[in-house]
Amino acid sequence: MVQLIKSNLKVLLDERDISLRQVSRDIDYRLESIRMLYHDEMERYPRELIDKLCVYLDVPVEKILVFDRE
């Protein structure tokens, strides 16, 4: 099956020069989950994590998770 929803977290964090460890500390969330999202390895997206990242990065959901038809 082709994956159409992809994580854009790597781009967002790299643009801001924020480490995964820093995000984990700042939003009080498991580093491993953030790492999986960063590397686009997640099959299911925890709502709480997405919510915290939206607030932390001040972006809407569609900036973190993108729909890629190609």
Image: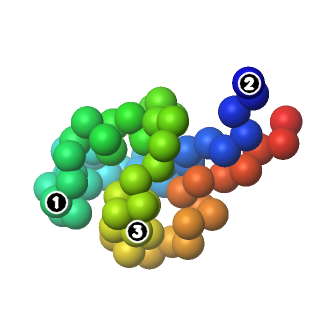
Residue at position x 66%, y 52% from top?
66
First reached walking from the N terminus: tag 2 or tag 3: 2
Image coordinates of residue 18 in percent, x first then y, are 31, 52
Image coordinates of residue 38 in percent, x first then y, are 43, 40
Image coordinates of residue 22 in percent, x first then y, are 20, 52
Between the C-alphas of marks 1 and 2, the distance is 33 Å
Residue at position x 47%, y 36% from top?
42
70 vs 44, left or right, is: right
4 vs 24, left or right, is: right
The kind of secondary structure element at disc 3 is helix
Q: Which mark is residue 28?
A: 1
First reached walking from the N terminus: tag 1 or tag 2: 2
Q: Which mark is residue 57?
A: none
9 vs 63, left or right, is: left
- Please name the residue that numbered disc 2 is placed on: 1
Q: Which mark is residue 51?
A: 3
The kind of secondary structure element at disc 1 is loop
Image coordinates of residue 64 in percent, x first then y, are 54, 57
